[in-house]
Image (cartoon, rainbow, N blue to C red):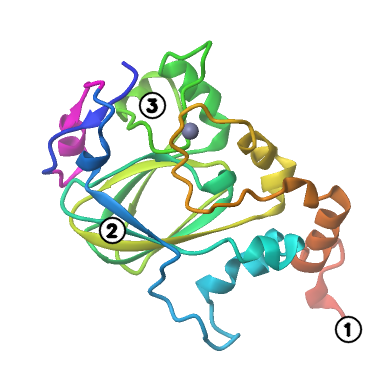
Amino acid sequence: MDEIIPQNLLVTDESSFRSSLSYSNNNNNRRLLNISFLPNTSFFCRKTSPTYFNIHRLPKQSLLKLGGKKVTDQIVPCVRRAHGSGAIFPLSSAQQRLCSINYHHEGGVHHWYIIPTCERDALQKAIGHKEVPICLDHGQLLVDPSLFAKHHIRYHRVTQRPKEFVVLAAGTLVQGFAEGASWSESINFALPGWIEEGCASAATLQCQCNNPNNYSPNTIDVTIFTHDLIEKYISSHLNNGTDDKPTTLEGL
Ligand SMILES: [Zn+2]
């Protein structure tokens, strides 16, 4: 079984989701997914007080700031619409395997299957493509969840309700379904692991699927992110409380 395409759209829980899966090899699955994307769209205010969390500022506060405006300006929010019960989010990862944050604005509960990047090889093996790897990143597949257990692939099941965030590490693969019509929104960002654990370089390899599902016309030049610059970023932004000397005891 290579591709698992949903046909029945009345899905309200995991068991009905699984029973709705079809083993068809029909590649014209986009219509059946019952979702649509609105790139460069957001329901959050762009201007808020600096004291409040603002999804629009996230890329500029992340490692991506090392690339300057040229990089951060191309990272934009994307609104996702699930049109009804059983809408399918096929297997995918964020653009260039970046980290991402996803906010559920309103509507039906989202059920996520989250596969860490360290399980990619095991997943490739499980779906039976040893010589020519199949694309896991660009919405080409929906994997029957029973396959994860069968092949000892570690994954997380997360239920996301309105007003809740899901934050995904670099390289993470996700798929899922919605219980009902909904609106959600995501934006990408980077932490040092995106470069240092090889996610960024792996993402630059040419994908054979010819369906990049990529809403940014530009690819981030990852050579900007040198080891020295990353070390500086870590020491100035991420090192709070990790020194040997506890900062809370200073002055005592
Ligand atoms: Zn692909």
* Residue at the spot of label 2: 81
* 15, above or below 158, in the image: above
* Residue at the spot of label 3: 148
Q: Indicate which label's residue lies in the foreground, 1 or 3.
A: 3
Within 8 Å: ligand 1 and the Cβ of disc 3? no
Per the image, label 3 sits on a secondary structure element best described as: helix
- Tell me residue 23's x, y (percent): 22, 21
Say whether residue 240 is left or right of residue 250: left
- Tell me residue 170's x, y (percent): 59, 46
Quadrant location of the C terminus? Answer: bottom right
The residues tagged by marks 1 and 3 sit, at their Cα atoms, a distance apart of 53 Å
* 11, above or below 152, in the image: below
- Residue 239 visible here: yes
| Residue 45, image quadrant | bottom left
Amino acid type indicated by mark 3: Phe
- Tell me residue 116's x, y (percent): 52, 38
User: What residue lies at 81% left-to-right and 73% top-to-bottom?
Assistant: 247
User: What residue lies at 84% left-to-right and 56% top-to-bottom?
Assistant: 229
The residues tagged by marks 2 and 3 sit, at their Cα atoms, a distance apart of 27 Å
Residue range corresponding to the magenta coloring: 11-25
- Image disc number at residue 251: 1
User: What residue lies at 44% left-to-right and 38% top-to-bottom?
Assistant: 138
Within 8 Å: ligand 1 and the Cβ of disc 2? no
Per the image, label 1 sits on a secondary structure element best described as: loop
237 inside magenta stretch:
no
Q: Are marks 1 and 3 in contact (CB under 8 Å)?
A: no
Say whether residue 178 is left or right of residue 194: left
The residue lying toward the viewer, choosing from 130 and 159, is: 130
